[in-house]
Image (cartoon, rainbow, N blue to C red):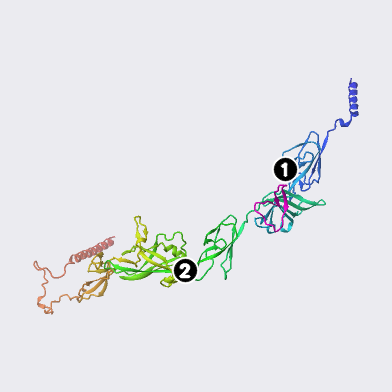
Amino acid sequence: MKKRILSILLTLCMVLMLCPVTAFAANYYTVTQNFKYGTLARIPEAENPHTFTVKEDETFVLTKVENCAPYEFVGWKESVSGTVYEPDEIDYMTFDAANLTFDAVYQVQGSLAITVDGFEVGNTPADCTFSFESTIPGVTFGKDDVEFVDWKKYFEESGGNRWEPIYETEAFEAGASYRITMYLDNKGLTEAPAVTVNGKTPEDCTIETSNGVPIQLQIDSTLGTPVEPSQYTVTYDGGEGSDPVTDVKTHGEPLTLRGETFKMDGFVQTGWVDKETDAAYRLGDTYTENADVTLTPVFEKIITLTVPYTTTVALGDVGVPGEKTFSLALIGDSAPDKDKSNVTITGSVTTNGKGSYNGTLTFTGTERTLWVMLSEGAFVQQVDAGEDGWTVDDTVWGVLMEEIPVAYAMGDDAIASGYTAYVVPASIDGNGYYYIDWENLQAADMAFTNTYTAHDYALKHDATHHWDECACKDVQNKELHKYGDWTVTKEATEQEAGEKEHTCTVCGYTEKAEIEKLPATTEPTKPGTDTKPGTDTKPDTDTKPDTKPGKDNPATGDNSHMALWIALLLVSGAGVIGTTVYGKKKRAK
């Protein structure tokens, strides 16, 4: 039985050995990756092309291309289907085993922006310049890289539309469309970068080769219709003896014209004028035209008009004012639409006490400005500073300018300018507005009367008080004196009284007072002597006092210490007795 099983096994082995090996072999496929620049991300040592095999029923993945600057890897292109798999897809996509070929797709990193400056209506191709801004790593472009430029203009005709070349000196026209062709040095690039021309993507952008070698970056771009000029020149021409100055105006944006720029003795510049169009502008006006322009200065003569007036100071009380200045000023809005920066108005008078004082109101400015300001009348009034004691005249006067022929003008200023000024009383309507009554127009002398009504106080005092008193007997600030310290002016003696005084610190009143005499001084007397004047000072031997004690005659001796002597005697006796007793006891032993 065992021999039979062994025979079966040997037979099976012989049968297997006789079967073809390929009957059990797996199928393998080849994948090819072609890359011109950079390295494979996970296989940096791989050479180009990189091939590997994939077993049947298995899948594979692709890897990205790195380190390919100035190019950027943008995907793998499958050679048969033409499908491009972008880098984001490669990260998660798997492919079934098959014989496949992939070619790396590149683009240049960064971009190139070309700006054609001067493509404006009225300019020519020769006026245009080119600037380049490249973000391509390690690659820059400049004007020296421009090898060829060609301009074409678009024509629409009944026989068909076409692009025709134009001359370098042919001006660009509004409404027409233009195209530019540029050849640039390729700067070593073998792939065309992303390019814009004046912000537009070109119709064609390629790398031209010669014998398989890249030599040029060729760009063909339609720019379209030229814009209006982007900048214009504003020229300020002061005429002979002055140098012109210029400003640049941007298309579509207003330009603020210059202020006073040129000088002329006796005149002031007040504006600008375009002599070609007679357009006039004030200083600092806005120029809005999109065109070049030359402006010349406008000068106006400076004139001075004077108006005399009188200011009188009256007293309404006994007070007398000191020096005081009163000024005049315009009220209301004279010539509201006129620039008054070149006009000065002065008018003031200084008074010093009661009386009349002459002043002059002066207008200095250009003829035109003063005429506009004063032809309909301007109103003048004193400035009231609100100072105590003053009542300021608030009369309003109208000042007019009248144009008269120079031959009849009066005064130097009037002869020079042909103008004169005069004053009329101003009227006031029910709404509080001043006006000139043209129906009853009469010139008058401008005058003001200002009254001073303050008290004139003087400091007075009596023996107890001081106060301020006006000549009108009005009394203010009465109070007791405020004295300082006493000062001795005469020392007191035994024979005479002294004196002292102190002074009020406010009014200076001095109060005096007496200082009492000093007390008298005397010598001490001897005992037992009669100090009465006119008596005998010798001792009387017959009048000795009775020294015997008696009932009615007490002893004249001093016995006030007798008890003390008796006590001392008793103590002494006790001491003697005590000593004797002690001695006896000692001997008895």
SS for callout 1: helix
Residue 232 lies, in percent from the top left, at 61, 59
Q: Is residue 467 visible?
A: no
Mark 2–mark 1 contact, CB under 8 Å? no
Residue 21 lies, in percent from the top left, at 88, 31
Question: Circle 2 sits on which residue?
Answer: 302
Examine the image and state in which quarter residue 517 appears.
bottom left
Magenta region: 153-179
Residue 34 versus residue 280: which sits nearer the camera? 280
Image quadrant holding the C terminus, namely: bottom left
Magenta span includes 158: yes
How packed is label 2: few (under 14 Cα within 10 Å), some, or many (20 or more)? some
SS for callout 2: strand
Residue at 55% from the left image edge and 65% from the top image edge:
296
Examine the image and state in which quarter residue 416 appears.
bottom left
Residue 141 lies, in percent from the top left, at 72, 56
Residue at 46% from the left image edge and 59% from the top image edge:
337
Q: What is the C-alpha distance between the residues marked 2 and 1?
A: 81 Å
Task: Name above or below for residue 457 compared with residue 44.
Answer: below
